[in-house]
Image (spheres, rainbow, N blue to C red):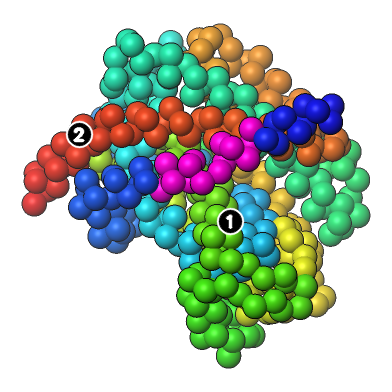
Amino acid sequence: MGTVTAFVTMINDIVWGPPMLIAILGTGLFLQLRLKFMPVTKIIAGFIMIWRGRKAAPGAAGEITPYAALMTALAATVGTGNIAGVATAIAIGGPGAMFWMWMTALVGMATKYAEVLVAVHYRETDDHGEQIGGPMYAIKNGLGRQWRWLASAFALFGGLAGFGIGNMVQSNSIAGALAAGFGISPWVSGVVMTVTTGLVLLGGVKRIGAVAEKLVPFMCISYIVASLTVLGIYVDQIPAAFSLIFSSAFNPVAATGGFAGAAIMMAMRYGVARGIFSNEAGLGTAGIAQAAGQTRNAVESGLVGMMGTFIDTIVVCTMTGLVLIVTGTWSSGLKGAALSSAAFTAAFPSFGAQFLAVALAIFAYTTILGWAYYGEKCWEYLLGTSVEVPYRALWTIFVLVGAVTQLDFVWLVADTLNAFMALPNLVSLLLLSPVIVKLTNAYFAKAA
């Protein structure tokens, strides 16, 4: 087993090394330039589209409202990466990692916009009469028969990765957080998660969307309010925190406390990698959820979809990063969820750890629901709609397995498969960029 782990670790280091990070950032920057930075200049328009998307336009094809589709996508992206991932990035890469997460998000908004646009533009109607889409359909219908192997590769990698990164890793994080914060047995939390997940999945994307559009805003707003309260307590440290973020993004950070120091490249690497892990821009997953949204125009879906990256990283991840820095815990030597817990405990000694445990549990649970839909559509592409019932049953079982087992190897394999998902998606976005630009220009020319 040690040899297998070492081999997978080597592959993981390669696929998530500088070439992959450059490919993801490079694709986003290329799309930003092709779109003349429209995703950045239309942020306000994106929020307006979200507000309008609470109700579907009459006669628009799709299964759920654009708002519910965005919440389903956010359910999958706003998760442990926003709490544990940001903490790890800052613990290893220093406060400057936060700056590179912001840059990744601003570039990634173009990637997410393009992913969603092509997913909706090239979506199909399945055997149940439901709208389905995503990178596999964009490749199949946009690039032609000779590229279908690439579409199948994405679906296979996504279908397998989901059981790890979107299921067992998340249920394990929930069980660990509840055990540490409240002393709840992993078996108890595992059984409860399994039952509730099964009940939600029985209703398909409509029930997932209904749960997501209630739970995701609640958890995001609660976490932001708690973080702003911490920042209010340490308000005098906020200017210094921003100064430290910008200065350490371009200059090595001197050793402080348990922090061993970080070079610029370390800040860049961990900031970019954790930013991508958190908002999933470049993986293509958001397009799968948004393709189920009711819409008359793929560009409008893209505008809604790109806001997921903004909300996930620019808003939620920033809250975590600032809390870690203003409380001074970032240099304590802790990493991951333990570091975030220490930061909230510093501000709220009596309940900080418990609050973070609940936040982490809710964040991770919604990720299980969002990724359940992603994985289902990947397997449906490969095997047809008959796979839905056995897939949902298997997904539900794996929730319990993840809660009660050690998952270091599963995490490693799933993280590697995530990188393999990105490659087909990035290739398709580059090859379909003329279509993306054409549709975008036509929409805004008509709206002018």
Report x, y in % for residue 95.
Answer: 58, 71
Does 384 appear above or below 135? above
Does 258 appear above or below 284? below
Magenta stretch, overall SS: helix
Answer left or right for 395 relative to 291.
Answer: right
The answer to which quarter of the image holds residue 255 is: bottom right
The answer to which quarter of the image holds residue 192 is: top right
Taking the image as drawn, is residue 16 in sight?
yes
Amino acid on which the number 1 mark rests in the picture: Tyr
Kindly identify the residue that appears in the image at 49 percent across and 24 percent down. 154
Query: Reading the chain from its start, which is encountered first: label 1 or label 2?
Result: 1
**Quadrant of the image containing the N terminus:** top right
Report x, y in % for residue 56.
Answer: 33, 39
Tell which tag, 1 or 2, sits nearer the viewer: 1
Q: Which residues are magenta?
A: 11-25
Answer left or right for 201 relative to 43.
Answer: right
The residue that mark 2 highlights is: 434
The residue that mark 1 highlights is: 270
Report x, y in % for residue 259.
Answer: 72, 71
Taking the image as drawn, is residue 119 in sight?
no
| Front residue (pair 241, 159) | 241
User: Considering the numbered disc 1 on the image, is that residue within a helix, a strand or a loop?
Assistant: helix
